[in-house]
Amino acid sequence: MANWKGYRITNPYGWINHPIDGNRSFHAGIDLVERHQAPIPAFIGGEVLFAGMGKSGTGLGDYGNVVFLKDTAGKGHLYAHLDSVTVSAGQKVNSGDVVGTQGATGRVTGSHLHFEVRKRTSPSFGWTQDRESGSLNPQNYVDSFTQKGKTDNYIKKIQQFVVNEGFSIAIDGIAGPKTRAGLYKVLQNELNKQYNAGLKVDGIPGPKTKAKLVNVELAATGNITKVIQALLNIAGYYQGNLDGIFGQKTLAAIKEFQKNKNLTIDGIVGPNTWSELFKI
């Protein structure tokens, strides 16, 4: 298995055979191993929303001792199966601050850290029945956050792009519904301009919009590619420039996205890939 940030990855993010029941299921985080009771530092800083034993029905059941924090972009970070926790609810932590120790509490086969990034922090601490649509690739998200300094700065670039295309949204660094709707408006507008799609520019990717979508692949350029790059960044897959050039970095991000969504890994943004991008 690969290594990441000094840990050995024992189970990746994506579709796996569950280590306990053997069923094929979506693993919404990554399993990391250093050593039992090793200190666990926060990958990204934020506010602790919960610290302690997760209870069934709260969105934290089966995870044992957990720390759940909210970052500046509004995403939820789950540190699970901890032997102990070293922070408390309401506490602000910085990247690198120890939040607990590696353990084997909850439903596990051995000592490890299960780390998730959830798109939302409420209700139920961002837990959703569809584990795939409610989570982000934690490695990509953390790496993007680290490389850019702060994810919200990249989101502001995305929001400025939307504003520059004539659609008013707040440039606040929060990748919420209004930012995604703004990107969908840019997409609809481009489909109208380039392909005479005749779409209502309402920011809703409904059946009429989906029927007018085009396949986008390597060497494509322009605002439709830029929308794809923006959505991939929000999902934690793309860390390259928001330049509208479908190059190798965009191709690699699309392929990883397709892999984790159980799609055909062809690097082409076709109907099925578009549908998954709209779920971000």
Image (cartoon, rainbow, N blue to C red):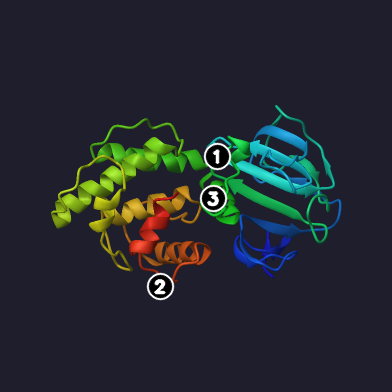
Measure the C-alpha gap from mark 2 to mark 1: 30 Å
Query: Observer-nearest residue: 177 or 95?
Result: 177
- State the separation of the CA atoms marked 2 and 3: 27 Å
Residue 266's mark?
2
Please, what is the three-letter code of the amino acid marked with disc 3?
Gln
Q: Is residue 241 visible?
A: no
The part of the image, by quadrant, that contains residue 249 is bottom left
- Please give the name of the residue rendered at 30% of the width and 64% of the height, measured from the top-left corner: 216
Which residue, given by chain and number where applicable, does mark 3 sit on? Answer: 147
Q: Is residue 31 shown to the viewer in this render?
A: yes
Quick one: quadrant of the N terminus?
bottom right
* Disc nearer the start of the sequence (2/3): 3
The disc placed on residue 120 is 1
Of residue 160 and residue 202, the one placed in the foreground of this image is 202
| Residue 226 versus residue 89 in the image, above or below | below
- The foreground one among 277 and 42 is 277
Q: Secondary structure at mark 2?
A: loop
- Identify the secondary structure beneath mark 3: helix
